[in-house]
Amino acid sequence: MPSARKPPEEPRQASPAEVVRTALATLDRRNAPPSVIAGRLNRVMAFLSRRLATRRQVIRAIGRLTAEGA
C-alpha cells in the first residue's frame, strides 16, 4: 500500500514586499527596536540560535545550510 504521507514542503522565502512591509511597520512604531527580523520562522530560529547554541555551532549550521542550497 503506498504511503499517504506528503513530502515535506520547502520553506517559503519571504517576498521583498513582505520584508519591506515588516520594516516599514516597525519603523512606524513609536519605540522601534534597533533591528527587526522578518518572518515568524526567522524570528523563532534567531531566538533559538541565541539561546540554545554557541555562536560557533550556529555559524557551522548556517554554513551547512547555505552550502546545500548552493
Image (cartoon, helix red, strand yellow):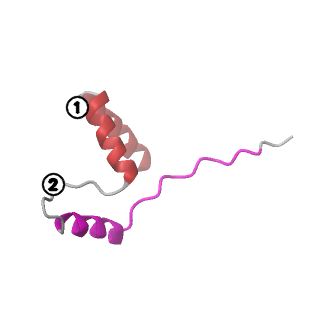
Q: Secondary structure at mark 1?
A: helix
Neighbour tally class for label 1: few under 14, some 14-19, many 20 plus, Cα within 10 Å: few
Q: Name the residue carrying label 1.
A: 55
Q: Quadrant of residue 60?
A: top left
- The one nearer the camera, 66 or 27, is 27
Q: Which residue is mark 2?
A: 33
As displayed, is residue 19 above or below residue 10? below
- Between residues 65 and 42, which one lies in front from this camera angle? 42
Range of residues picked out in magenta: 4-27
Residue name at image x 35 percent, y 42 percent: 45
Is 16 on the left or on the right of 23, as rendered? right
Residue 49 part of the magenta-drawn span: no
Q: Position of residue 6 (x, y in %)?
A: 68, 48
Residue 52 occupies quadrant: top left
Q: Position of residue 22 (x, y in %)?
A: 29, 65
How far is disc 1 from disc 2 in space, using C-alphas? 22 Å
Q: Nearer the viewer, mark 1 or mark 2?
A: 2
Are there few (<14), some (14-19), or many (20+) residues within 10 Å of tag 2? few
Instruction: Determine the residue positioned at 36% across, 46% down.
Output: 66
- Residue 47: image tag: none
Q: Quadrant of the N terminus?
A: top right
